[in-house]
Image (cartoon, grey):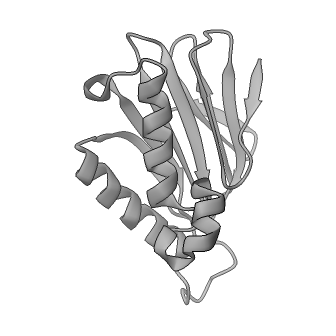
Amino acid sequence: MILQVSISDMKVSNDKDDVIITSSLGSCLGVTLYDPVSCVGGMLHALLPQSNMNPVRANGNPHMFVDSGFETLLAAVLELGGNKKRLICKVAGGGTFLDQKGVFKTGERNFIIFRKVLWKNNIMIKGQEVGGSVPRTLILRMNDGQTLIRSRGVEVPF
């Protein structure tokens, strides 16, 4: 089954028949976590870097923000049987869209906060496709944990 992750959304699965997908990654950050032993994984599509920017919105939807969204993704993957020490983490997006003058730097800030959250959780990035101005689709196949990037009609593993 295809599990579509919208902006400010998250999906997790332990079903080997599932494929988790998010599209339109510009300055947003797409994050995958996958445990290759238990075949548990998930994906987050976060819009903004820090939940303290708007605590009321973060309380209503923690997936909108990189910091609170990652924490909920990690908790959900672990709850389904994932093991933190085995997690494979990959990230895409964080580009410079609609901000060509570099005023807001949302994509850059998203990635900086993401790295801080990973450091806090003692998780390393195993693959990244970050920055630039090319929109991306992020795909996680639950049967084998392969993560793919689709951009401009080309799909490649990373």
Along the line of sight, which residue is nearer the eye, 55 or 93? 55
The image quarter in which residue 89 lies: top left
Q: Residue at x 66, y 72 (%)?
A: 97
Q: Residue at x 28, y 41 (%)?
A: 124
x and y, in percent, of residue 132 in the image: 55, 64
x and y, in percent, of residue 9 in the image: 67, 48
Q: Is residue 74 above or below residue 1?
A: below
Say if residue 95 shows up in the picture: yes
In this picture, residue 120 sits left or right of residue 110: left
Q: Residue at x 57, y 38 (%)?
A: 43
Along the line of sight, which residue is nearer the eye, 157 or 79? 79
Say if residue 158 shows up in the picture: no
x and y, in percent, of residue 120 in the image: 25, 53
x and y, in percent, of residue 42 in the image: 55, 31
The image quarter in which residue 35 lies: top left
Q: Is residue 87 above or below residue 70?
A: above
Q: Is residue 70 above or below residue 11?
A: below
The image quarter in which residue 1 lies: top right
Q: Is residue 147 above or below residue 116?
A: above
In this picture, residue 105 sits left or right of residue 15: left
